Amino acid sequence: MTRHIKVAAAQLGPIQKAEGRQSAVSRMIELLKEADAGGAKLVVFPELALTTFFPRYLIEDPDEIDSWFEREMPSAVTQPLFDQAKQRGIGFYLGYAELDNKNGETKHYNSSIIVAPDGNIVGKYRKVHLPGHKDYEPDYKYQHLEKRYFDVGNLGFPVWRVFGRVMGMCICNDRRWAETYRVMGLQGVEMVLLGYNTPWGNATHDEPMHLKMFHNHLSMQAGAYQNATWVVGTAKAGYEDGNGMIGGSCIIAPTGEIVAQALTEEDELVSYDCDMDLGKYLKQTTYDFERHRRIEHYGIIASQTGATPPPE
Ligand code: CDT
């Protein structure tokens, strides 16, 4: 079996609040067709790809909150995307808000799935590192209410064999945490798929705009290199009802190098023919975990959350 796979990051420009899911799905289908024409076999769409980034809004009515969530996947509105992908033999990653109702208990997750080229969902991930805050903060310049609307993901960071390669997923803020990649790295991950919605603005402190993009790429490049894995990061970008979000969707090699990157903040496809053996030499040398990791010194990582400096 060839160890190459052509992948595409299918960046979406803004989805306005009034824009329906149907329009978002149509836009994704156009990107999927372009990916197919270019020979891509795997397409990565953004986090919460079906709607505007609703966690920026304070919503108090439970029914209105639930209206932003999907109760089933595929749903009537997303079925055409599944059908097009299956018809073309393309797999895809899709981020969406998931309403889970098991045994009478309702949970809300910020989720993603991997859909195999045969149209079947082979993997689901639920976002673990939820950023922002639970309550409306009148003094903040921007609200980011993910902790209000979502439960912490309960599936960990699994990996799956797709196209015979080991693939994992994470979502947006997860990409900033070294633990995200290392847990997948320890399962031999070869490609991490991730979608993001990153606002240009901060709630309480101003940062120069270039820093936002620097940190976006820095965290994904470090995760790729330190685990010798490909990373495909896809943004929802541009101005959603006046709220700016960064673009910079990219494909990163196991060497940590960006090999393809979006230039716009619009719907844009970037693709690359990835050699899945490229990470092998790193996995056998610098990042041969079996030989070099010293777990007897890492216990604190899994036993405490906050930092505890020594007394002054
Ligand atoms: N969607 C998401 O996780 N966004 C965060 C921004 C958080 S700002 C409170 C990110 O890490 O990009």
Image: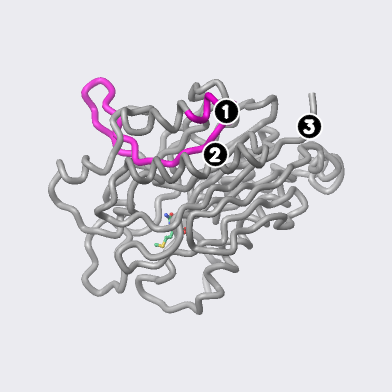
Q: Is mark 1 within 8 Å of ligand 1?
A: no
Residue behind mark 3: 3
Report the side of 81 relative to 270 (left or right): left
Element carrying mark 1: helix
Q: What mark, if any, has residue 88 been given in the picture?
A: 1
How many numbered markers are drawn?
Answer: 3
Element carrying mark 2: helix
Q: Position of residue 295 (x, y in %)?
A: 69, 42
User: Bounds of the magenta span?
Assistant: 84-108
The residue under label 1 is which amino acid type? Arg
Of callouts 2 and 3, which one flags the residue occurring earlier in the amino acid sequence?
A: 3
Q: What mark, if any, has residue 226 been given in the picture?
A: none
Q: Position of residue 210 (x, y in %)?
A: 56, 75
Residue 78 is inside the magenta segment: no
Q: Are marks 1 and 3 in contact (CB under 8 Å)?
A: no
Residue behind mark 2: 33
Q: Position of residue 196 (x, y in %)?
A: 48, 52
Report the side of 306 relative to 15 (left or right): right
Residue 185 seen = no
Q: CA distance from mark 1 to mark 3?
A: 20 Å
Q: CA distance from mark 2 to mark 3?
A: 23 Å
Residue 102 seen = yes
The residue under label 3 is which amino acid type? Arg
Colour scheme:
one colour
Residue 143's quadrant in the figure? bottom left
